[in-house]
């Protein structure tokens, strides 16, 4: 066999948010276009190891070195393997990762992933560490879809990268850089291409999607997030539009009005609140008050009475008192949040909150987190219970299990539903009646 024809196997491991998941799928697309590479799920026989990291909370960093330790053992046996570390920890720690793990070959950032083929070539030629983490490029999005790999009905579409908000607890503006917004024509063209391979639902992606605004060179005018939503809603095959993550500060009346005019916008909104105390929100530098947040929700519910709202919460932010925490619990009941994410505050180096005095014991924070999570689970269950007997629209995603007649799809409010149906329904947008809510991970429905 000609040795040149043997493809190099690539193993990719991803941690973190949807941004990172999407970045990893772009990495796959970019590398699979090159004939010399093939993906593998088995690290033992891989030639190239790529770790796409996350640094939003502290744990991720230590996890990185544990993972690298495991790969070091493989490299001791097979010295020619290449190890590349990318993502937010890479941007944050840069060369320091190499100083602790001298056996790695490449360090790349979230905005240099399009250079990976070139970096890999260099790494094979030259054994010196290659570090390329400069930020501020949207080049990678030129490769964000690959019609061969992305054969599915739901797809992420990145519209921007980075964040200018500098919430006092958050590392993202430092690791992903300042906001850069993609050209509107490029986004629309990507969505149209996706519809050609069957995509019916898109999830617009960015750290701060509703801050999106560009200058439309053709019509010579400003073009913002609502403009984008209206334009997408005119693409015939897109049945559903979701987005993550939006910020309360830029949730303006135009965007609220869009919920009246665009039926494709789902009855589900993830709008991070973080805390129910105005004092803490101020320390977090979130830029809104509880009253302003409630006003957004009130206006939205006027238009969409059944909309489900989910949120992110940070527990134990420096100085959070029992009273502050109680306010968070109160607002959770008042807004009646659906399934939400909650995290114990993690001190991130270089952020403004890192300088604040934090004297709440970790045991107390864990207790608060448990109370909050229990409450969210109860509320989420009530939302689920209210779905019994209702009619829900779903996109049929595939077969549910071993039984080919049992299919699955997802409701607007993110619940998986199983139902009996012919596999030819896969990819179709259909209506189901919810008939059973007693299974743990899914609901049961029947076609109507
Ligand atoms: N852009 C989004 C969120 C990005 S990070 C927004 O506007 O909210 C995702 C979530 O991680 C945040 O909403 C926050 O709840 C959590 N998070 C971010 N930094 C954190 C930290 N230092 N400690 C704990 N949780 C954090
Ligand atoms: Fe982080 Fe706040 Fe931006 S949470 S991503 S700095 S909106």
Image (spheres, helix red, strand yellow):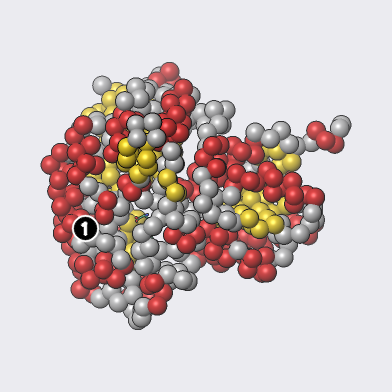
Q: Where does residue 130 sit, x and y in percent of width and height?
A: 70, 57
Q: Secondary structure at mark 1?
A: helix
Q: Nearer the viewer, residue 348 or 341?
A: 348
**Looking at the image, can residue 422 be seen?**
yes
Q: Is residue 415 visible?
A: no
Residue 100 as seen in the image, left or right of residue 389: right
Asked which quadrant contains residue 341, the reply is bottom left
* Residue 434: % across, % down: 26, 32
From this viewpoint, which residue is outermost toward the left? Answer: 302
User: What residue is rendered at 37% in x and 40% in y?
Assistant: 215
Q: Residue at x 79, y 54 (%)?
A: 126
| Whether the residue under disc 1 has CB within 8 Å of ligand 1 | no
Q: Going by the image, does 80 lie left or right of 170? A: right
The quarter of the image holding the C terminus is top left
Q: Which residue is mark 1?
A: 332
Taking the spot 60% from the left edge, 63% from the top edge, the residue there is: 94
- Residue 140: x %, y % from top left: 55, 42
Is residue 217 placed above or below 252 in the rendered structure? above
350 sits to left or right of 95: left
Local packing at callout 1 (Cα closer than 10 Å; few below 14, some 14-19, many 20+) is many
Toward the front, the furthest residue is 220
Indicate which quadrant contains ligand 1: bottom left
């Amino acid at each position: 066999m000609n040795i040149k024809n043997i493809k190099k196997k690539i193993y990719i491991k991803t941690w973190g948010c949807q941004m990172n998941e999407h970045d990893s799928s772009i990495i796959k697309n970019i590398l699979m276009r090159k004939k010399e590479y093939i993906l593998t799920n088995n690290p033992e026989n891989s030639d190239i190891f790529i770790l796409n990291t996350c640094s939003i909370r502290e744990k991720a960093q230590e996890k990185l070195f544990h993972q690298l330790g495991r790969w070091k053992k493989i490299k001791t046996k097979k010295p020619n393997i290449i190890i590349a570390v990318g993502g937010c920890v890479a941007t944050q720690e840069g060369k320091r990762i190499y100083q602790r793990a001298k056996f790695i070959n490449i360090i790349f950032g979230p905005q240099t992933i399009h250079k990976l083929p070139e970096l890999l070539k260099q790494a094979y030629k030259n054994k010196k560490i290659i570090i390329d983490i400069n930020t501020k490029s949207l080049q990678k999005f030129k490769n964000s879809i690959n019609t061969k790999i992305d054969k599915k009905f739901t797809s992420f579409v990145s519209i921007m990268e980075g964040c200018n908000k500098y919430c006092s607890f958050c590392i993202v503006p430092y690791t992903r850089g300042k906001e850069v917004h993609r050209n509107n024509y490029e986004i629309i063209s990507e969505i149209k291409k996706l519809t050609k391979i069957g995509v019916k639902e898109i999830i617009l992606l960015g750290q701060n999607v509703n801050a999106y605004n560009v200058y439309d060179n053709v019509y010579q005018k400003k073009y913002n997030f609502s403009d984008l939503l209206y334009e997408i809603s005119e693409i015939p095959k897109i049945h559903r539009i979701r987005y993550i993550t939006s910020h309360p500060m830029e949730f303006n009346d135009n965007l609220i009005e869009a919920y009246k005019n665009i039926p494709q916008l789902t009855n589900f909104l993830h709008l991070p609140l973080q805390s129910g105390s105005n004092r803490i929100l101020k320390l977090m530098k979130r830029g809104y008050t509880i009253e302003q947040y409630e006003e957004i929700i009130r206006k939205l519910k006027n238009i969409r009475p059944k909309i489900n709202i989910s949120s992110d919460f940070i527990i134990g932010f420096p100085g959070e008192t029992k009273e502050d925490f109680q306010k968070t619990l109160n607002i959770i009941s008042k807004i009646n949040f659906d399934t939400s994410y909650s995290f114990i505050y993690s001190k991130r180096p270089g952020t403004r909150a890192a300088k604040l005095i934090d004297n709440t014991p970790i045991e107390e924070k864990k207790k608060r987190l448990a109370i909050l999570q229990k409450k969210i689970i109860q509320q989420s269950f009530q939302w689920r219970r209210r779905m019994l007997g209702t009619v829900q629209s779903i996109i049929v995603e595939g077969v549910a299990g071993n039984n080919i007649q049992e299919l699955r799809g997802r409701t607007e409010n993110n619940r998986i539903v199983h139902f009996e149906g012919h596999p030819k329904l896969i990819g179709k947008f259909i209506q189901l009646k919810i008939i059973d809510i007693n299974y743990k991970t899914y609901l049961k429905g029947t076609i109507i």
